[in-house]
């Protein structure tokens, strides 16, 4: 019986606060030793309290994906925010202007059109908005190709009066598909080298861009090896999840997020039903392991199927779970789990210490 069962009902998304603190301290130390600024991405936790803890642990500022997240975090006292997402449209530019009047905001883009609108906003506010230029380092999402293609764009954007190009940035999210830590190391080096090569080319052309900002939790583990990098933006390191555990990048004791679920049915031999479905665990799969989450106490059990409120577990032969028993689950992807819940249960030494409000949940605009 878990100590918190008299206080919490299942399904319960819990955060071990001691493990959280250890994760924050470990990554802050990693950045400090490498001489790199830590600007964590708060999309993982969407919690003002955790963002404040990250700042206490030495973060230079935070990263968000959407304006709504930035507004929530600014209301929570965070005053240095990078919006790592293109700002497009009149209403969003108006909101960005309001935010710029309150705090320091940096923005990002991979296009001249977006930069031009940002420049006009900067001129209106009588300031130069700090701008990161997004570069494709292999994920094939946003960003033009490194080298000449990005250099040409940077030169064009650099002529605009209302912005200041302060960094090249990228997100090597493809690292999550790698099955070994050594493969993630290779992605980390490729990611950094793509930006540094572009930075050098621009310097030769007479344009100095001082910042080199890299993203993704898997590649952040190797930041001490990456010459030229000035900033890193990991997110999922705060909680840990299967995407990191299954590749050997972290140990089980670094997984601060656990989902507790109750067995509610045992309809067939070898099959049990838990009260956590896709609305709790998310439908995210892992490329490294079958199922919709990992049960540490039953490592050979597989959560084979989800409906909205049901999780179907296939048990290994000789294993039994009874109705009313509680299982703990390490999710495949902690970020999407957080966004499904209004609050997370913060536990210390197995007891409920505080509720962690997910204030920026649903802030997709």
Image (cartoon, rainbow, N blue to C red):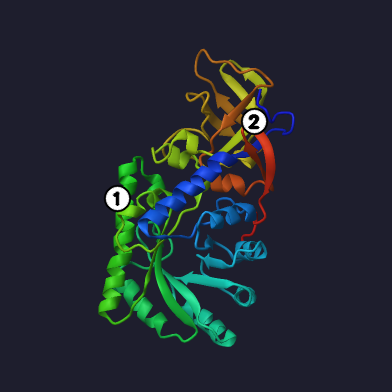
35 left or right, relative to 200: right
Q: Quarter of the image containing the C terminus?
A: bottom right
> Residue 324: in sight, yes or no?
yes
Image vertical order of residue 71 relative to residue 19, above or below: below
Q: Where is residue 152 in the image (x, y as percent from the top left)?
A: 33, 78
Taking the view exactly as shown, the residue that stands out farthest to the right is 6
Q: Position of residue 60 (x, y in %)?
A: 50, 63
Q: Where is residue 169 shown, x and y percent of the image? A: 40, 65
Counting every numbered tag in the picture gives 2
Q: Which residue is tagged 2?
A: 261
3D distance between C-alphas at marks 2 and 1: 38 Å
Q: Quadrant of the rendered structure where residue 227 is? A: bottom left
Q: Residues within 10 Å of mark 2 (few under 14, many from 20)?
A: many
Rendered position, 51 above or below 321: below
Q: Residue at x 30, y 53 (%)?
A: 225
Specify which label sits upstream in the sequence, 2 or 1.
1
Look at the numbered disc 2 and give the secondary structure of its residue.
strand
Instruction: Residue 326: name its quadrant.
Output: top right
**Is residue 164 shown left or right of residue 55?**
left
* Residue in the foreground of this view, choosing between 258 and 65: 258
Mark 2 touches mark 1? (CB < 8 Å): no
Mark 1, secondary structure of its residue: helix
Compared to 177, does 149 lie above or below?
below
Residue depicted at 31% across the width and 57% down the height:
226
Mark number displayed over residue 282: none
Q: In this view, does 5 lie to the left or right of 124?
A: right
Asked whether, in this view, residue 316 is left or right of residue 50, the answer is: left
Q: Label 1, on which residue?
A: 186
């Amino acid at each position: 019986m878990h100590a918190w069962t008299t206080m919490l009902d299942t399904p319960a998304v819990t955060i071990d606060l001691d493990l959280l603190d250890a994760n924050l301290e470990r990554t802050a130390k990693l950045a400090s030793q490498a001489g790199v600024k830590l600007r964590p991405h708060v999309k993982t936790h969407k919690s003002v309290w955790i963002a404040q803890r990250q700042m206490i642990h030495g973060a230079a500022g935070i990263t968000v994906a959407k304006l709504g997240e930035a507004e929530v975090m600014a209301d929570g006292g965070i005053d240095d925010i990078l919006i790592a997402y293109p700002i497009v449209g009149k209403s969003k530019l108006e909101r960005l202007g309001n935010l710029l009047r309150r705090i320091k905001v940096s923005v990002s883009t991979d296009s001249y059109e977006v930069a031009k609108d940002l420049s006009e906003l900067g001129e209106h506010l009588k300031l130069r908005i700090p701008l990161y230029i997004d570069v494709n380092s292999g994920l094939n999402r946003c960003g033009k190709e490194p080298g000449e293609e990005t250099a040409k764009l940077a030169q064009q954007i650099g002529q605009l009066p209302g912005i200041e190009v302060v960094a090249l940035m990228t997100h090597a999210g493809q690292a999550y598909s790698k099955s070994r830590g050594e493969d993630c190391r290779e992605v980390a080096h490729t990611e950094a080298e793509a930006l540094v090569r572009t930075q050098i080319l621009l310097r030769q052309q007479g344009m100095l861009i001082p910042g080199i900002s890299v993203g993704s939790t898997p590649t952040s583990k190797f930041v001490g090896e990456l010459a030229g990098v000035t900033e890193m933006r990991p997110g999922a390191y705060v909680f840990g999840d299967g995407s990191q555990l299954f590749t050997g990048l972290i140990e089980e004791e670094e997984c601060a997020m656990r989902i507790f679920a109750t067995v509610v049915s045992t309809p067939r031999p070898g099959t049990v039903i838990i009260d956590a479905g896709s609305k709790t665990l998310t439908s995210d799969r892992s490329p490294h392991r079958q199922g919709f989450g990992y049960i540490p106490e039953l490592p050979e059990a597989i959560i084979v199927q989800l409906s909205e409120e049901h999780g179907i577990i296939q048990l290994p032969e000789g294993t039994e779970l009874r109705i009313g028993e509680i299982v703990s689950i390490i999710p495949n992807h902690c970020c999407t789990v957080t966004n499904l819940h209004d609050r997370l249960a913060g536990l210390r030494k197995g007891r409920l210490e505080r509720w962690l409000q997910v204030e920026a949940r649903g802030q997709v605009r």
